[in-house]
Amino acid sequence: MALLHRRDGATERRFELAVDGTAAVAGDPVEGELRRLEGPAEVTLLRIETCPAGRLATAVRSTRVDPAEGHARFELPVPAETPPDGAGKRCRLAFAVRARSPVSGRRRSEVTLPLGMGGGDHAIHEAGHMFDRMIASFPARRFHIELADARLEGGGHIDGRVHLHGDRPVRRLEVLVRCQEIWRTNFRLRNHHQPPLWRTETLWSDTVPVECDPDRRWYPFRFALPAGLPAAVEGYIVCWRYEIEVRRRCRFARLERAVVTPLRFDLGWPEP
């Protein structure tokens, strides 16, 4: 239970917000109750992204309730594609339930409760609509990467294989996987002429060498992701991304690379 901690304007109205449980699961509703309520209220499920550049709270679902004898039950559906809460080295993704009464006007009270969130089992994919950022995904001239299976979070894994093509032999390859924490540094600017700027920091990486055989055309790989890493999320201002890279070091030419970046939870963009 939480008592009032913020008040917009001078008002004597006070109410309480109670949520059934301290955590929710994607796909299941969040239920609770407002008490000592004197008028209609708006209850909202918030997704909160925090990075060194600031904090962004986005409304996921909202509902309006009317009190009966000072009490009102509410139910907020949680979308199945909702990611789990998590934290990296400098960024965090969290959730909260916020209640405001009355629904509009300057003289209204607000109560907010933090809420844990368990993400849904969202399938990985490689297509996205992130028009303002570069997500690496390209083949090399003599090889490419095929992803077989992955659970992109701490304690998960990445399975795939490298396919060789062409007639010239390849002697040695390096397969590298890294978990990157990425955040936007200028999200407060609303100027359309200012491109979004992102900063990247590597949370974890691992590399395995592959000795190639002239009679083989593909080589499997598997990486175990250490516990504690956040789930793969493409947010508005915070991202956690898992990149798979295969390198071929050439003696008289520049490094040859193939990269695949599987995506899991895409939050899209908020409506203006």
Image (tube, rainbow, N blue to C red):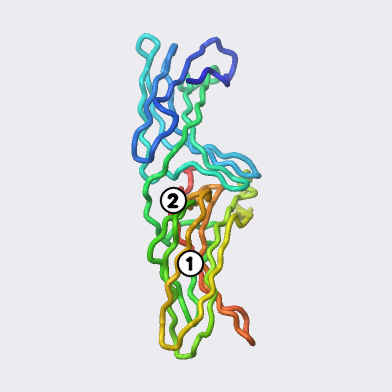
Q: Which residue is mark 1?
A: 260
Viewer-proximal residue among 1 and 154: 154
Viewer-proximal residue among 109 and 137: 137
What kind of element bears circle 2? strand
Q: Position of residue 67 (x, y in %)?
A: 37, 14
Relative to 112, 72 lies left or right: left
Residue type at the position of mark 1: Val
Circles 2 and 1: CB atoms closer than 8 Å: no
Q: Which residue is mark 2?
A: 265
Q: Is residue 59 above or below residue 245?
A: above
Q: Is residue 243 above or below residue 181?
A: below
Relative to 186, 244 lies left or right: left
Residue drawn at x 56%, y 39% as measured from the top left: 56
Residue drawn at x 52%, y 85% as measured from the top left: 171
Lower sequence index among marks 2 and 1: 1
What kind of element bears circle 1? strand
CA separation in Å, label 2 and label 1: 16 Å
Q: Which numbered tag is attached to residue 18?
A: none
Q: Position of residue 116 (x, y in %)?
A: 47, 35
Residue type at the position of mark 2: Phe
Q: Residues within 10 Å of mark 2 (few under 14, many from 20)?
A: many
